[in-house]
């Protein structure tokens, strides 16, 4: 019998979809999640599955972590502090969570020689004005006086630590930078824009666009993101690499609001809200966030297939 797969953060939005995918493929799965931003309800469809074991707790506080990881054949590390609301309002929690959980899981995986896929974020590209972000680009992070950049810095430090474990301790690790993944089970509670827009449109409430609405993003369906993660796990050539995962079709946030309203036939209107009103004064945002997906396609042969309309419909139906 093959060893189980460990998914940290497996009760979260992306993690729960990954868990379902692994179980459907016949694998045994162990989920380790403290349910701080994840929810048991996300795993409702599989919680009684005989090949699923759910452990509630923090990665860094799990006394049995070395043995748990050692008994597994692969680790997907998705546990992290997520969402702009959490980052802005709870910077200590954000920094400590990302650094401590990464340190714990990387140490356990290195000790057991267990391959690991580490999920990072497009935020690490920072304030760069490039139109398209490639994995080997220089990174431009804002000053520490603006707490908004603490999330990017903590995840970037995680990337350095992961690659250090590969160089010094031969840990087989792949780093994935996720770009605006969305879909069913994602909540707007932590500031994610598309579920917030869908919830507002369904309720006939205004869709509040922060800033001038001309900032651009690319939205990837969670099913496409999970497909990419599964393929990268199986790709030996991806070990030691940083790989962008997302969609590469950009649109402005203002256009996103209009698309949601039109797709759902809503009576809602769009409102623009200054950043200083939405967040603390001095808040900085990335104007553009579009990934270069050439490396993902070269390594796995995969490109995202689902369009924005499908994400909006699936979010609305959830």
Image (spheres, helix red, strand yellow):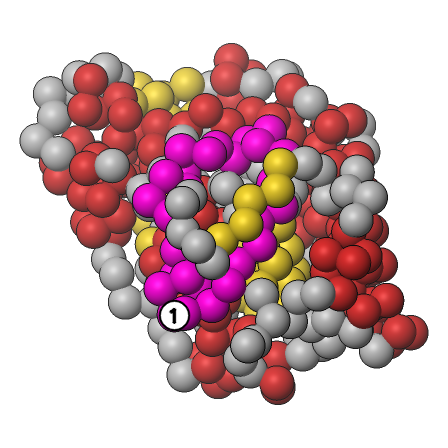
SS for dot 1: loop
View extreme (right): residue: 168
**Percent coordinates x, y for residue 79 in the rendering:** 63, 45
Kindly identify the residue that appears in the image at 73 percent across and 71 percent down: 114
Kindly identify the residue that appears in the image at 20 percent across and 51 percent down: 310
View extreme (left): residue: 265
The number of numbered discs placed on residues in the rendered structure image is 1
Q: Is residue 228 magenta?
A: no
Q: Is residue 75 above or below residue 315?
A: below
**Percent coordinates x, y for residue 84 in the rendering:** 56, 31
Using the rendered view, name the quadrant where residue 18 is placed.
bottom left
**Percent coordinates x, y for residue 173 in the rendering:** 70, 71
The residues colored magenta run 19-46
Q: Is residue 208 above or below residue 42?
A: above
User: Could you say which is closer to the camera, residue 145 or residue 90?
Assistant: 90
User: Could you say which is closer to the camera, residue 148 or residue 48?
Assistant: 48
Kindly identify the residue that appears in the image at 40 percent across and 33 percent down: 41
Mark 1, residues whose alpha carbon is within 10 Å: few (<14), some, or many (≥20)? few
Q: Is residue 18 visible?
A: no
Kindly identify the residue that appears in the image at 44 percent across and 54 percent down: 50
Picture quarter with the C terminus: top left
User: Could you say which is closer to the camera, residue 145 or residue 190?
Assistant: 190
Using the rendered view, name the quadrant where residue 204 is placed.
top left
User: Could you say which is closer to the camera, residue 260 or residue 317?
Assistant: 317
**Percent coordinates x, y for residue 85 in the rendering:** 56, 25
Q: Is residue 41 magenta?
A: yes
Q: Is residue 305 visible?
A: yes
Residue under pointer 1: 25
In the rendered structure, the answer to whether residue 289 lies left or right of residue 49 reads right
Picture quarter with the N terminus: bottom right
């Amino acid at each position: 019998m093959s060893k189980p797969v460990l998914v940290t953060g497996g009760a979260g939005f992306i993690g729960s979809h990954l868990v379902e995918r692994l179980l459907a493929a016949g694998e045994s799965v162990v989920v380790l999640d403290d349910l701080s931003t994840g929810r048991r309800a996300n795993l409702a469809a599989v919680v009684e599955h005989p090949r699923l074991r759910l452990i509630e707790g923090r990665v860094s506080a799990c006394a049995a972590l070395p043995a748990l990881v050692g008994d597994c054949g692969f680790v997907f590390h998705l546990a992290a502090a997520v969402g702009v609301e959490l980052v802005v309002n709870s910077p200590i929690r954000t920094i400590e969570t990302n650094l401590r959980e990464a340190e714990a899981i990387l140490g356990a995986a290195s000790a057991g020689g267990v391959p690991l896929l580490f999920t990072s974020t497009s935020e690490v590209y920072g304030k760069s004005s490039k139109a398209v972000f490639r994995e080997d680009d220089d990174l431009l992070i804002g000053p520490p006086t603006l707490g908004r950049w603490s999330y990017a810095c903590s995840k970037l430090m995680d990337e350095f630590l992961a690659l250090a474990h590969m160089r010094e301790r031969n840990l087989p690790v792949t780093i994935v930078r996720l770009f605006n993944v969305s879909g069913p089970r994602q909540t707007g509670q932590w500031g994610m824009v598309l579920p917030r827009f869908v919830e507002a449109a369904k309720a006939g409430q205004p869709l509040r666009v922060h800033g001038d609405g001309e900032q651009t993003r690319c939205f990837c369906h969670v099913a496409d993101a999970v497909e990419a993660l599964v393929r990268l796990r199986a790709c030996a050539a991806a070990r030691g690499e940083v790989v962008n995962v997302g969609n590469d079709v950009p649109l402005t946030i203002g256009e996103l609001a209009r698309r949601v309203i039109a797709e759902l036939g809503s009576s809602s209107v769009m409102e623009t809200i200054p950043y200083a009103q939405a967040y603390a004064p001095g808040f900085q945002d990335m104007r553009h966030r579009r990934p270069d997906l050439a490396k993902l396609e070269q390594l796995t042969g995969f490109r995202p297939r689902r369009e924005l309309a499908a994400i909006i419909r699936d979010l609305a139906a959830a």
